[in-house]
Amino acid sequence: MSLPDVTQHLNALEPAESAERYNYGHFRPRLVAGEVVKTVAARGIAPGEPAPDFELPMVGGGTWRLARHLNPPILLRFGSFS
Amino acid sequence: MAYFGDRVRLVEVIVRQGHPGPEVPCYESFEQKLRDGYRYKELEAIPWTVLVDDLRGTVHQAYGSLADPTYLIDNDGRVAFYSVWTHVPTLFRAVGALLGREGLGVVLGGVDRRPHFGAALTNGWPALRRGLPQSAVDLETSVPLSAVGSWLGYQLRPLLAPVTLRERPLPPMAKAALGAAAAAAIIYGARRRTRREGRGAVEVGNGAPTGGDRANGAPGPGQRAFAVGLRAPMTQARAVPVTRGWLSPGAPEATA
């Protein structure tokens, strides 16, 4: 899946949040409510669907692209510093 | 996941600040985010690959912008399984099942959406601590007792970690024992509470509830006192003006 496909997939999920809204300044109850909805609806890439390809900077230098690292299986975790 | 060695690759993507605070404000530049990626890898001594998403969280949003997910991607680049709230023992089973199928296909029904908070309760405090005091205040006002619980869970880490931070699923006997212990604790607590309330009714009502119009069911003075006696502590607890002092209405709100 190419980068334009990632954008298309993103648009299919829901309208993308702006950088300002995505990077909220305070953890608020609306975020909790949103997480409840996402959990109930199991929001995410449906099992069996292609995982959207991406290329991101790597801590330590260089970039990492998903499509180049398939096999063995990948555990892809999304985490936060705080 | 050390058990699987190089038969599975672990990659982590740093996304937005989960619990911003004075020392970890919401990101305004990619450089901030990249710096935190380095700090995270160093502070937590992370041996696996750490990537940094762009400022808008394009990849995070493409994957559903969930709070704490982990995807298992098969050899063909398809989602084999994902845990909405990362639960290592379940992922352990999923990886084992996927490897048993030569790394292809959907495993364990494809998704685990159960809210697993044991690991966050035990190990979430260090991340929350980075944004103090704002991070704890915001979390506490959004989900009461969760910040306190996080602190307490971290203090009880030696006790809780063998269960909440385990890598492998518990054996059925251990699950049954834990379930029985939890049920016994709940029953014991409920019985204690019932006994205490029974004693409270006698004390507040100065004897057995009396009076009232028994014909139409209206409560007498003793019964009303009993009801007030039960409600008073809850009312007082709710009346603490937490939101006024803690939310600081003048604080800047970064959301659009």
Image: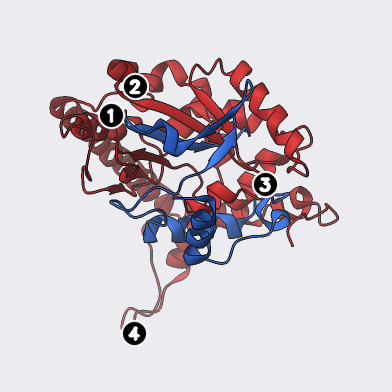
Chain colours: A blue, B red
Label 2 vs label 4, nearer the camera: 2
> Dot 1 falls on which chain?
B
Q: Are marks 4 and 1 in contact (CB under 8 Å)?
A: no
Query: Along the horizontal axis of the image, is A69 left or right of A6?
Result: left
Please, what is the three-letter code of the amino acid marked with disc 3? Asp
Query: Along the horizontal axis of the image, is A35 left or right of B209?
Result: right
- CA gap, disc 2 and disc 4: 66 Å
Q: Nearer the viewer, residue A18 or A48?
A: A48
Mark sitting earlier along the chain (2/4): 2
Q: Nearer the viewer, residue B230 or A64?
A: A64
Q: Mark 4 — residue?
A: B216
Q: Are marks 1 and 2 in contact (CB under 8 Å)?
A: yes
Mark sitting earlier along the chain (4/3): 3
Q: Nearer the viewer, residue B230 or A67?
A: A67
Query: Along the horizontal axis of the image, is A56 left or right of A47?
Result: right
Q: Mark 1 — residue?
A: B92
Q: Are marks 1 and 3 in contact (CB under 8 Å)?
A: no
Q: Can the viewer see residue B177?
A: yes
